[in-house]
Amino acid sequence: MDDVVKKLGSREVLALAQADVLGVRERHRKRRLTTLALIVGMPSAFLWYRIAAGRPFNIFQLPHLGGDPIMWVPAVLFSLLLIVAILGPMLGNSRSPHVMYRPEQIEIGFDDVKGLGPVVDEVIRTLNVFLGYATFRNELGGNPRRGLLFEGAPGTGKTHLAKAMARHAGVPFLYVSGPAFQSMWYGMTARKIRTFFKALKKTARREGGAIGFIEEIDAFATARGGLDSSVPTDIARSSLFGRMTNRMGMSQGTGGTVNELLIQMQSFESLPALQKFTDKLKNWVNGFLPHDKQLKKKVPSYANVLLIAATNRGDSLDPALLRPGRFDRRLYFDLPSRSGRRELVDYFLGKKRHDAELDRDDRREELAGMTFGYTPVMIEHLLDEALIVALRHGRGALSWSDVNTAKLTEEIGMPHPVAYTADERRQIATHEAGHATLAYLVGEGRRLEVLSIVKRREALGLLGHSETEERFTRTQTELEALLTISVGGMASEEIFEGESGTGPAGDLATATRVAAEMVGSLGMGGSLVSYRAVADGVFDPDLVGRVLSNPETRRKTELLLRAQKQKAKALLKKNAHLVLALRDALLDRDELIGDEILVVLEAAGGAKAQRSARAGVRRGAASRAASIGRSGS
């Protein structure tokens, strides 16, 4: 017993031989054998008695039906068809829509779950308490968790981890999707929920435990009394007593289903059919007995049930579902960290044929770094697409170049070569070379991934660059560098082509959004007022709109953008040889990938120019810090 108590909180799954689940299962197995012996033994004894008495009984002989069958057979068939036609749809719609899986039917285990370290540890501890529920309740006096809510972005591993739980728990796994509960018949959704929980609890009593998994629970369990529409109807105001909200709207019709779910998750334990019958019989007998002689009724047995639900919209669920006793624990599935992505890369590459280059530690680290923001499903899909690229080129194993090609295609789109005019081709190459040169000069800590003048979706050309290290915050200097890179294409066209065209439209939109955030939200425009503090109204525009609609903040945004454009033009004029080198390389090859960009820049003397430009950026940051210190003193 002490060993079981120690393992309830450990990071290793409790062995089934030590679990209380096994004891319950063994008792039910013996009870089923006894029942089977009685069902088979009593008729067998009767048949042997008849044989011994000389009166054998033919159990295969059908009873004789008198009269002409042509008279009664059609009436019987018609009655049966009428009953099926009337009751069939109702009975079919009221059955539980779940599918039951046994542990041996699930291939995924905890060894196949990568990049979810803290979440997996918490799930294993919950699973151990579930398996040792009797020890936890009777010896320790605790109440096992009844529900887990998995929430997070699509593809982060919610269903994957639930399958691993089912495999290691060793108990039946009842899977159902949220939309499967919905029905065209009024009241049938609530009835389906009742039958699902009835099946779940019945299975748990028979097997010692059962796990239910509801995928996309937000399909029927959203907050009661709200209205989801394109126009918000909340009128919110702040006061000294906190935020006050007057909600206007109509019910979505989910109130009854949510109420049923709340009742089933935590209410009185439902009784098995046999116990209901015996209790009714005892009630009838107790009606004839005095109070002190009445028959005692059995306390309902505990149903060891663990309900798991998955959703991408945890905030939209009814608050009553999230209190202790229902979904006791909310586990958020975040995007994997760099170390988590490295685990995923190692795991997926271990199952896919690849070149020896991808076995190098530096390549795998680089792949983990360049997939920042990817979910586990996206990483696996990226490698699958890379394998397809390899097959397209007649190779049976994916390579590093295949991964880069697949990443470019997935993020930006497939290449659509078009016949540019000579002037267009030179202008696009000049534009992208300007971006790349400034990213190389001022983009400290950034990796140049791809430089192209091949059309992909709406982009006539592109520069792909990312951070070499995983960063979650940025300084003002780094944001200004991003602005400089964004307006670099326009500046390059004006310097080397004499004027800019329609190409910078997307760059200016991106730069305006960043500059508006700096001025209106991050306190980098001379004011500490944040436009994010403004409450959203019915037709309230976004933060960029609020910043640009104010004359003062619009002026500051404009000044910030113009200052970075002047800086970009000064750097490009000083390093014109780098721009021209990249432009010529693009005109010659159309696309440069990764190290190919650096080779062109360094051959043109880029290393010295890079050190000079970044030193100037650091001096500017230092002077800004010194001026802030003087003003503060």
Image (spheres, rainbow, N blue to C red):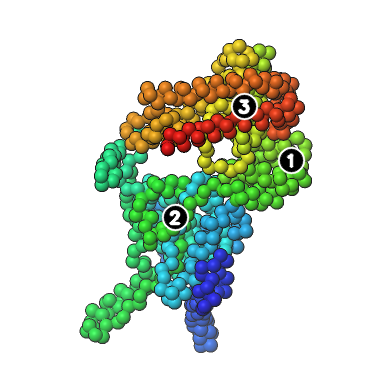
Crowd around label 1: few <14 · some 14–19 · many ≥20 (10 Å): many
From the viewer's perspective, is 302 left or right of 494? left
Residues at circles 2 and 1 in contact by the CB criterion of under 8 Å = no
Question: Which one is earlier in the sequence, the residue at label 2 or at label 3?
Answer: 2
Q: Is residue 130 above or below residue 361?
A: below
Kindly identify which residue carries mark 3: 438
SS label for mark 2: strand
The tag on residue 330 is 2
Q: Amino acid at mark 3?
A: Leu
Where is residue 42 drawn, in percent x and y? 48, 81
From the viewer's perspective, is 259 left or right of 197? left
SS label for mark 1: loop
Q: Amino acid at mark 1?
A: Ser
Question: Which one is earlier in the sequence, the residue at label 3 or at label 1?
Answer: 1
Crowd around label 2: few <14 · some 14–19 · many ≥20 (10 Å): some
Q: Amino acid at mark 2?
A: Arg
From the viewer's perspective, is 194 left or right of 366? left
Where is residue 295 drawn, in percent x and y? 30, 82
Where is residue 54 drawn, in percent x and y? 52, 86
Q: Quadrant of residue 409?
A: top right
Q: Nearer the viewer, residue 1 or 617?
A: 617
The tag on residue 399 is 1
SS label for mark 3: helix
Disc 2 versus disc 3: distance between alpha carbons? 45 Å
The tag on residue 524 is none
Residue at 45% across, 35% down: 630
Residue at 25% across, 44% down: 240
